[in-house]
Image (cartoon, helix red, strand yellow):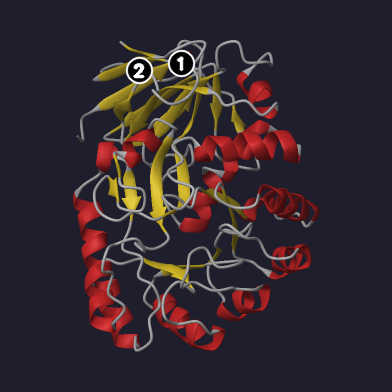
Amino acid sequence: MADEKLVIRNIGLMLSGRIEAPILDADCLIAEGGRIAAWGKEADLDTEGATTVIDARGVTLAPGLIDSHVHPVVGDYTPRQQQLHWIDSTLHGGVTTMISAGEVHMPGRPNDPIGTVAMAIAAQRWYDNLRPSGVKVHAGAPLLQQGLEEEHFRQMAEGGVKLIGEVGLGTVKDGKTANRMIGWARKYGMQSTIHTGGPSIPGSGLIDADMVLETGTDVVGHINGGHSALPDDQIVCLCENCKAALEIVHNGNERAALLTLNTARELGKLDQLILGTDGPAGSGVQPLGILRMVAMLSALGNVPAEIAFCFATGNTARRRDLDVGLIEKGFAADFVLMDQAQHAPGKTLLESVGLGNLPGIGMTVIDGKVTSQRSRNTPPATRLPELV
């Protein structure tokens, strides 16, 4: 791996993932040992000794997309919809990294402290040991359960657990108890998210703005509801008062998503917006969910497409402390290569996405290795990159 060198040349447009400077002046990128080494004009770069060469043929290169909110269970199978290979399908939607908001659909999921700890460490392990189709799944996100003590959080952290699943889906339902547990989790380096809005399935409950603020999690999970959103004034209140990531999901309320976007823009907080699908869920699996959110927010929220792509890449990487999602030296060489869909309106990929159209994906790359070629799920791209 260390001596592997990837050269991607003839890139038509390079998106950085950085909301402050979303477009790079570059037509070539080099990765060494699965990490980004350099980018710029091909004439200025050392392209000698490449073990893999991709001719982008004028298409757009962006950091691989990140889905900030999924509910995996085990491997590439979800019992929620009895579906196999949903993660592979999502890779064909340009997503190279997924973050669990809790393995809530595990049949017979334990709610006692010892069972919760055991399952969290096991889930972290099995996705660490197995990457479905190469996709990086950050899992092992326990729900807050009555009876958990500080010692349990220490055990989980020592076992490799870095996430807390959606607060409110476990047996802890009050803000005060949740806040205390989130404090323990944070002490041991674990990041937390909270369910926001009305109940998603029988057994879950309403979580309003007051509880979100009292709990103090790192991510306001599906601020646009999953499925039912909070009233407008509470969404505005969260945007105004939260320093946490404001997560908009595909499986939520689209009107509330646009309210969140417009409020965040007025407050100068677009850097806090991140995207998830919240699948698998009652709405099923959304292989193109992140692309659909980018196109919807760009088209209906009047956001330049290159900025909307940052919501699904660099914003999430920075909020989640990941080494993906940005074209940055030393970051993982995870990319999606895409082009305007055949016969889609607009003169360029960005213009087409800004009109609400999905791009066609031609290739994904994870850790410098090609993980998929022409997408079986997006509309066909006008041009396709080529593995030379």
Q: Residue at x 41, y 75 (%)?
A: 170
What is the number of the mark on residue 42?
1
Q: Does 348 sit above or below residue 205? A: above
Badge 2 crowding class, 10 Å Cα cut-off, few under 14, some 14 to 19, many 20 or more, is: some
Q: Earlier in the sequence, mark 2 or mark 1?
A: 1
- Say which amino acid is labelled 2: Thr
- Say which amino acid is labelled 1: Glu
The location of residue 310, given as percent across then percent down, is: 58, 41
Q: Quadrant of residue 370?
A: top left
The location of residue 250, given as percent across then percent down, is: 56, 46
Give the side of residue 51 with respect to residue 56, left or right. left
Q: Quadrant of the C terminus?
A: top left
Which residue is situated farthest in the front direction here?
A: 202
Q: How far apart are the two marked residues, 2 and 1, measured between alpha carbons?
A: 8 Å
Circles 2, 1 touching at the beta carbon (< 8 Å): yes
Viewer-nearest residue: 294 or 156: 294
Mark 2 highlights which residue? 47
The location of residue 339, given as percent across then percent down, is: 53, 18
Q: Residue at x 60, y 67 (%)?
A: 198
Give the side of residue 212 with respect to residue 67, left or right. right
Residue 95 appears anywhere in the view = yes
